[in-house]
Image (spheres, rainbow, N blue to C red):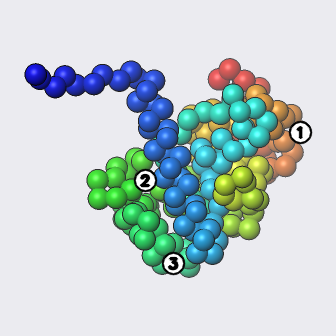
Amino acid sequence: MTDTPVMISGWERVARYMDELRERLRRATAALTAAGVPYAVVGGNAVAEWVGRADPAGVRNTKDVNVLLRRSDLPAATSVLSAVGFIHRHVAGLDIFLDGQYGKAREAIHIVFANESLRHAADTPAPDVTESEPGVEFPVVTLVAVVRMKLVANRDKDRLHLRDLAEVGQIDATWPARFPPALAERLQAVLDTPNG
């Protein structure tokens, strides 16, 4: 009798991938929390947290985990994350944590350093870890901070995330006034084009 490969659908693959991503996020944040290392979740998972608070059906999948840390806490974070299976690498100017020996960079935990210039704008620093609030499972940057970071990055996926936040009512026409003129203009352009 021959073994036939088990076929799984694309939906099942996506579901498995999302389960793995959530497990990676939970394992990393639980370890950092238990060790008392200050951090906050940023990026797509922060957007998902804010969108999900208003409308869980509006949450969009993301492929990696982005964590905000102070650079001075990187050694402690490295020790803590190594103890739960992550491997620290410095790749192309980024600090990442691969999930084990065979982890992929695109699925890694990506570190954003608090109070340091964001890659996309030398004059705009990332928020501090104190610009966060508790979530159900982990601290997440405030809504203002996540919107600011998305406006600074200004990639297609960042504008899509901003549209998601607007669609569920987390941000609205009053929000551009909260930002400097260049970022306010970007946000207004997103709000004026809800369908991209």
**Disc 2 versus disc 1: nearer the observer:** 2
Asked if disc 3 and disc 2 are in contact, CB closer than 8 Å, the reply is: no
Q: With respect to residue 131, does 21 lie above or below?
A: above
Q: Quadrant of residue 13?
A: top left
* Residue sitting at x 67%, y 55%: 137
Q: Is residue 106 visible?
A: yes
Q: Which residue is mark 2?
A: 108
Q: Relative to 9, is 40 on the left or the right?
A: right
Amino acid type of the residue that numbered disc 3 sits on in the rendered structure:
Ala
Q: Quadrant of residue 61?
A: top right
- State how far apart marks 3 and 1 are (Cα): 40 Å
Determine the residue located farthest toward the right in the rendered image.
Answer: 174
Asked if disc 3 and disc 1 are in contact, CB closer than 8 Å, the reply is: no
Q: With respect to residue 12, does 177 lie above or below?
A: below
* Residue sitting at x 77%, y 40%: 53
Residue 40 image offset from top left, x and y in percent = 65, 61
- State how far apart marks 3 and 2 are (Cα): 18 Å
Of mark 3 and mark 2, the one earlier in the sequence is 3
Asked if disc 2 and disc 1 are in contact, CB closer than 8 Å, the reply is: no
Amino acid type of the residue that numbered disc 1 sits on in the rendered structure:
Thr
Q: Secondary structure at mark 2?
A: loop
- As drawn, the label of residue 174 is 1
Q: Quadrant of the N terminus?
A: top left
- Foreground of the two, 90 or 34: 34
Residue 133 image offset from top left, x and y in percent = 76, 59
**Disc 3 versus disc 1: nearer the observer:** 3
Of mark 3 and mark 1, the one earlier in the sequence is 3
Of mark 2 and mark 1, the one earlier in the sequence is 2
Q: Which residue is mark 3?
A: 76
Mark 2 neighbour class, 10 Å CA radius: few under 14, some 14 to 19, many 20 or more:
many
- Foreground of the two, 72 or 190: 72
- State how far apart marks 2 and 1 are (Cα): 36 Å
